[in-house]
Image: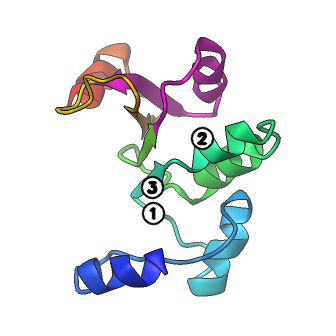
């Protein structure tokens, strides 16, 4: 499987975990492999959101709520979303998600063809100023 391949390539790196489960039930999936309260510093989605959007998008809220539940509550949690370009509506829907600040269509080398894009969300704390947020998004 893809997970077995990734484990064979990166399984020796400390603090990297690869699990199989339903992403729309992320908290339950994580609880099957780790302590119920486990949180992650970085969550990477490569194409899953695209697949859910092709299916009427009904499970997108479940996916994104799950990400919010398992992404660390510290102000340095990061959600990386690699997807096809998002519509303005899809971007605004993601921006409405709790305390994540999104940066859409991040320029990456090789991304000039416009077929894929990188989007990054960072966890905010209630005390973050706009200046702090802007600096963190540029990092």
Image location (x, y in percent) of residue 99? 55, 34
Q: In this view, does 65 lie to the left or right of 134?
A: right
Which of pointers 2 and 1 indicates the residue nearer the eye?
Answer: 2
Q: Is residue 10 left or right of residue 119?
A: left
| Residue ID at (60%, 43%) | 49
Total labels drawn: 3
Mark 3 Cα shell of 10 Å, populated few (<14), some (14-19), many (≥20): some
Label 3: which secondary element: strand
Image location (x, y in percent) of residue 16? 34, 75
Q: State how far apart marks 3 and 2 are (Cα).
A: 16 Å
| Residue ID at (63%, 23%) | 90
User: Pointer 3 and pointer 2: residues touching (CB < 8 Å)?
Assistant: no
- Which image quadrant for residue 113? top left
Q: Does the magenta stretch include residue 94?
A: yes
Q: Is residue 29 magenta?
A: no
Residue span colored magenta: 83-106
Residue at which label 3 appears: 43
Quarter of the image for the C terminus: give it: top left
Residue at which label 1 appears: 40
Q: State how far apart marks 2 and 1 are (Cα).
A: 22 Å
Mark 2 or mark 1, which has the lower sequence index? 1
Visible residue check, residue 42: yes
| Residue ID at (42%, 41%) | 82
Label 2: which secondary element: helix
User: Pointer 3 and pointer 1: residues touching (CB < 8 Å)?
Assistant: yes
Q: Is residue 58 above or below residue 7?
A: above
């Amino acid at each position: 499987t893809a997970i077995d391949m990734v484990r064979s390539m990166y399984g020796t790196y400390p603090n990297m975990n690869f699990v199989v489960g339903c992403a729309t039930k992320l908290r339950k999936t994580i609880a099957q492999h780790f302590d119920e309260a486990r949180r992650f510093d970085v969550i990477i989605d490569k194409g899953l959101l695209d697949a859910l959007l092709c299916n009427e998008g009904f499970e997108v809220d479940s996916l994104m709520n799950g990400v919010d539940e398992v992404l660390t509550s510290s102000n340095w949690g990061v959600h990386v979303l690699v997807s096809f370009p998002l519509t303005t509506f899809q971007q605004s829907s993601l921006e409405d998600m709790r305390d994540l600040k999104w940066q859409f269509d991040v320029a990456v080398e090789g991304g000039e063809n416009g077929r894929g894009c990188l989007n990054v969300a960072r966890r905010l704390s209630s005390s973050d100023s706009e200046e702090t947020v802007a600096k963190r998004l540029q990092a």
